Image (cartoon, rainbow, N blue to C red):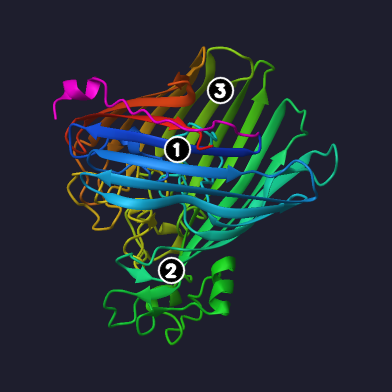
Amino acid sequence: MKKTHCLGVLLVLITMQYSIAQTSDTKNWLEIGTGITDGKYQPFWLRSNQYGMVPVRGSYFQTNAGYVQDYKKKGRLKFGYGANVQFLVGTDKSAVQIPELYVKSKLGIFELWAGMRKQTFGLADSTISSGSFVWSGNALPIPKIELSVPNWFYPKKGGFFAFKGNFAHGVFENNRTDAAHVFLHQKSFYGQFGRETSTIKLFAGFNHQVQWGGKLLYADPNNSAGINGQVPTRFKDFLYVVTGINLAAVNDTTQFGKNDAGNRVGNHLGSVDIGAEIDFGSFKVLGYRQSYYEDGSLFWLNNITDGLHGISIQSKKEGTFRKLVLEYFNSTSQGGPIGSDAPFAWQRGLDNYFNNGVYPQGWSYRSRGIGSPFITAINETDLPLTNGGYFDNSRVEAFYIASEWEIKDTKILFKGSLANAVGWYGKEFVPVKKMYSLALFAQKPMKILGYDATVKANIGYDQSEWYKNTLGGNIGISVPLF
């Protein structure tokens, strides 16, 4: 497909509805759209952090419908629910996907919900970040049940300290290539220091995720990953998962596979985050850093140079400019070139982010990375293989900028990045493999045949050594269902 075709009108899609009424606590929609590319892959920022709704490869047509019932304002015990179904037909992938399907309830400060729900975790800009290290919105949501304090809560009215957090149990898909019936454990806790009206607020907290349990789908004759093909799923194993207790002192290979017996139960990963926000009246500035961990490297500060560093400037006044985000992402250290055979614990590195010996498909859900999109899987680039893991391109340095504008009733978002793939230790790319990625997103409400509609048009371009240069775009029209 020629690039001139991508720059033209991608497709004009018109749809009619009988009614357009929606209330403040309900939302419903039907969207029809298409995306095209002149290469093998969709442009990086058109497919990244889209909750798995845009395929990695090829052109596509999609339609999705959704309905959300939020909490009613009245009542002590509140209920809500949401559903979103997508029909995707593409040159590389066709599927029926369910990005969201959940029920929720709220009592006081607590929320309990079950199902699939779009979320991100980690201290970062909430709308236009490049994506948190561990949970960026890059993959379809994982089914789980979650108890949380979703909003900042001050234990003392007018106090100086507030907190929020979550505790969740989930399940990975059963069509993985490494194991079936794999569980997810997740928890987070974040504190805010500063009153609601304070000019300066400080933040600190962590998130903790674990893949654990399951039935192995590959041969494990030496019981390295499990016992007779089964990764432990007992209640006491769950307690080991939650607490993160190291089992190396006991090293009981009669109850655990050799990997877990000499380490911890499950694949642990997350981030420790800090940040500060200053309110200047007409705008506010948020600075943040996420420090990564997958084993003990962060404890010994071996991988302290790795992290997501960002600054977000947000306007509080009506006007054209809405927000600017600048970020620096680094995952090139990973604790250094010495692995678990290091003579001293403080020397250990080779973290190999998102990869794992028990779960070779790593930190992925339905073949997409759950964490930062800069760490790519083997099906997302044409880079030479260097570490042999599912996330072969895990040592990356990236610079990112995003800005959000509103011109009359048209919302415009720009994203740009430079990402350098370094290659694995001992197989480094010299020089590094670069990828420049640009994307422009536009959204505008308008009338079509007398009915309210929202038109979205996006275009992206990658000048890349990760794969051939790629130009593509997508367009969609969304209307209320009823």
Q: At x 46% / y 69%, what residue is drawn?
A: 212
Label 1 SS:
strand
Q: Which mark is residue 364?
A: none
Q: Which mark is residue 30?
A: 1
Task: Give the crowd class for mark 3: few <14, some 14-19, many >=20 residues within 10 Å.
Answer: some
**If you read the primary sequence from the N terminus, does the residue marked by circle 1 or circle 3 appear first?**
1
What separation in Å lies between label 1 and label 3 (alpha carbons)? 33 Å
Among the 4 quarters of the image, the one containing residue 105: bottom right
The verdict on residue 402 being magenta is no
Give the labeled residue for mark 3: 313
User: Which dot, 3 or 2, sits closer to the camera?
Assistant: 2
The verdict on residue 18 being magenta is yes
User: Which dot, 1 or 2, sits closer to the camera?
Assistant: 1
x%, y% of residue 324?
Answer: 50, 22
**If you read the primary sequence from the N terminus, does the residue marked by circle 3 or circle 2 appear first?**
2
Q: At x 17% / y 47%, what residue is drawn?
A: 384
Q: Is residue 125 above or below residue 315?
A: below
Name the kind of residue labelled 1 in the image.
Leu
Name the kind of residue labelled 3 in the image.
Ile
Magenta residues span 1-23
The answer to whether residue 305 shows anywhere in this view is: no
Q: Is residue 175 above or below residue 189?
A: below
Q: Is residue 446 above or below residue 352?
A: above
Label 2 SS:
loop
What separation in Å lies between label 1 and label 2 (alpha carbons)? 33 Å
Q: Nearer the viewer, residue 295 or 470?
A: 470
Q: In this image, 476 relative to 107: left or right?
A: left
Give the labeled residue for mark 2: 182
Label 3 SS:
strand
Among the 4 quarters of the image, the one containing residue 138: top left
Q: Quadrant of the C terminus?
A: top right
Per the picture, the main secondary structure of the magenta-coloured stretch is: loop
